Image (spheres, grey):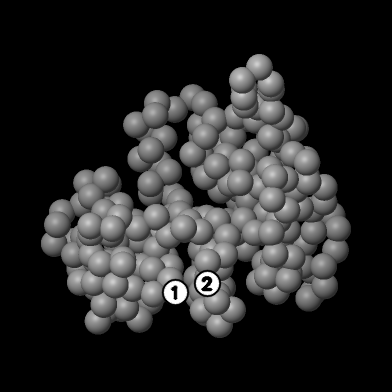
Amino acid sequence: MKNKIIELRNVSKHYEVGEDLVRALEEVSIEIEKGDFVAVMGPSGSGKSTSMNLIGSLDLASKGEIYLDGNNIEELEESELAQIRGKKIGFIFQQFNLIPNLTAKENVMLPMLFQGKEEIERELKANELLDLVDLGKRKNHYPNQLSGGQQQRVAIARALANDPEVILADEPTGNLDTKTGEMVMNFLGKLNKEGKTIIIVTHNPELAREHAKTIYSVKDGHIESLEKKINGKWKRV
């Protein structure tokens, strides 16, 4: 498992809705290798969002095993899991999920607070990251004073706050215009070239094929196919 940062082994996720049992995922196996750019792709209701929650260790499986950096997350205390997850994974959400009464800088500083970093270190790092995403001049603005694209860039800076190995992005261009979305995807590609593992959850096959190196296609709670880009061409494996 030395090259695997995240692994789902025969994972199922079931929910009880009233008297019904919803089988959101059934016997799914996913391997995320360090340094890869992975797309989990599927239409609405396919199970890809459930997959994202399990890949990000935000939820536990009904059956099967989930490993984060070699640790079976079922065997970890919630506080221990939160610490590992906070260091290893940076999250970017479609709705941005910025805290409205915090400035851009304060939003970026927040994940570092949970990791016990000193205020001066948090402030310096937040300034550095906002400069990286070309928002240094907007650091004291609140989310409602920023465009959608600017909010997504703040969300990216926040995701990078603890220098995680993995960036997990849920529909990162879903609320953006085409030009801004392309800029965000190119930035994620740049991070991947610098060694970050990137995982995007998307319903957009063109986006996945243009930027990813590995694609898991999810349909009706199952992995329908696994494709890898080999020598510039997509091949089923």
Q: Position of residue 130 (x, y in %)?
A: 31, 73
Residue positioned most to the right: 236
* 170, above or below 131, in the image: above
Amino acid at pointer 1: Gly
Say left or right for 219 vs 68.
right
Horizontal arrangement in the rendering, residue 74 relative to residue 50 (left or right): left
Could you tell me the amino acid type at mark 2?
A: Leu
Determine the residue positioned at 74% across, 65% down: 205
**Residue at the (65%, 38%) spot, across then down:** 8
Query: Label 1 belongs to which residue?
Result: 149
The circle on residue 13 is none
| Foreground of the two, 100 or 171 | 100
- Residue found at the far front of this picture: 18
Quarter of the figure that contains the N terminus: top right
Looking at the picture, how far across and down is residue 96, in whole percent? 43, 60
Dots 1, 2 in contact, CB < 8 A: yes
**N-terminal-most mark, 1 or 2:** 1
Q: Is residue 109 visible?
A: no
Q: Is residue 164 left or right of residue 4?
A: left
Q: How many marks?
A: 2
Q: CA distance from mark 1 to mark 2?
A: 6 Å
Residue at 44% of width from left, 49% of height from top?
Answer: 88
Residue at 38% in and 46% down: 86
Residue position marked by numbered label 2 in the rendering: 176
Give the position of the C terminus as an image quadrant. bottom right
For label 1, the SS is helix
Answer left or right for 150 relative to 94.
left
Q: Nearer the viewer, residue 188 or 3?
A: 188
Query: Secondary structure beneath disc 2?
Result: loop
The answer to whether residue 115 of the structure is visible from this angle is yes
Q: Quadrant of residue 146?
A: bottom left
Residue that lies at the very extreme toward the top in this rendered image: 19
